Structures are given as structure tokens and as C-alpha cells.
Image (cartoon, rainbow, N blue to C red):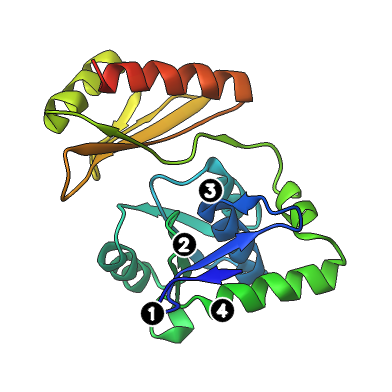
Amino acid sequence: VAWDGDADRCFFLDETGKPIPGDFVTTLVARYFLKRSPGAGIVYDLRASWAVRDWVSKLGGRPISERVGHSYIKRTMRKDDAVFGGEVSGHYYFRDHFYADNGYIPLLAILEMLSEEGVKMSELVASLGEYHISGEINSTVANPPAALERIKAKYADAEIDERDGVTVEYPDWHFNVRPSANDPVVRLNLEAKSHELMVQKRDEVLAIILA
């Protein structure tokens, strides 16, 4: 387990040294809290894997997506009385911790799950099922707004959400493209129902971004 300098973010590796993506940690911690707060709301950022939405729904919770950023996540948690919120970036927020982000509560939750279930970290992650994500990919472009317009034009037949960059969703794949606030960079997070489709669509979207 690793924390950032002020310990408000937390990152996990499994026993083989493989990093665990933040949205999978969000899913695991959401499962932990929903067992203790049935029906509760769980807030997650819109870059996240479908794993979060699927598991929160499966366990009877309320999946609530929000744009990236602690102020947006915390505001929505308060508004919807959500017990937990998580971001792909490793920030995790807790209603009973004054809605603040904390890097130690996720560790304790994960340790308790590992102990109770008697499994390794890789097995705990595998229990989520098959989800194929690209991870965040940064591309330097001269005109980020133009790149977003190209994305919207190409995928105009999809379900499109413009709360934070452009989020595009089809039945078997989805992605978010967001501009950086400080650099001429756009960030892509993409997921598909199979590894092959993820690779194909990742390369397709990157080509449009860089066109």
C-alpha cells in the first residue's frame, strides 16, 4: 500500500506487484460499506469502470456518478446522503469522516475483507468479474476543444454526457475524454466488454484525438 504525501490518497498493489486501479478499489470499498449501510448512495467519478455501477446496483445501493474533483464529489455526497465516494485518482471520501478524503480507511476496509474472506488481494479483485479498462492515457494536442468536438461528431449516435469533457456510452463500451486544466493535454479513460474491443476502441479514439 502507498499513500501520497498528506495521506489523503491511497494506492494498492496485489501480492504479485500488479497495481490495482482506483475504480476497482472504489468498487471493493463500496461493497464493504453497502454491507454495513444497505441501500446507501455511493458516489463515483464519471471516468470509472462499470464495475462500480454494477456492484452498487447489485448490492441494492444507489450508484451516483459525478464529475471529477473533490468539491463536486463531496457536494453530491452531502446532497444525496451518500456513505462513500471514490475517484479513479485514489481519493476516497467518507460520510462519517466529515465527507473528507482519507487514505487509511480504505486500507482498513480492504484488510478486513481479506481477513474475513481468507483470500489474496488478486483474488479479491478477481471477485469483481471481467472488466477491461485502458487506464488514463494523456495526449498532447494543440487545440483540446477541437478534439472534443471531433469526438462528439464521430460518436453522435451514442449517449453523450458533457458534465466533464465528453463522456460517450454504448452498450458494450464507453469512455471519457477530459481536457487538462493546466496543459494542452486531453485525458482518455475507456472501457469495453472484452479486451479486444477495448484495444480496438482505445486506438480508434486516440486517433481521433490526435487527428
Among numbered discs 4 and 2, the one appearing first in the sequence: 2
| Mark drawn on residue 105 | 4
Horizontal and vertical percent for residue 95? Answer: 44, 79
Gap between marks 1 and 2, in whole Å? 13 Å
Q: Residues within 10 Å of mark 2 (few under 14, many from 20)?
A: many
Residue at 39%, 85% (x, y): give it.
98
Q: Which residue corresponds to mark 3?
A: 53
Between disc 3 and disc 2, whose residue precedes? Answer: 3
Q: Residue at x 60, y 19 (%)?
A: 196
Badge 3 density bin: few <14, some 14–19, many ≥20, Cα 10 Å = many
Amino acid at pointer 3: Arg
Nearer the viewer's eye, disc 3 or disc 2?
2
Residue type pointed to by label 1: Ala
Q: Which residue is mark 1?
A: 100
At numbered mark 3, what does the secondary structure look like: helix, strand or loop?
helix
Spatial CA span between label 1 and label 4 = 11 Å
- Residue 36 seen in the current view: no
Alpha carbon separation for disc pair 3 and 2: 17 Å
Residue 20 appears left or right of 137: right
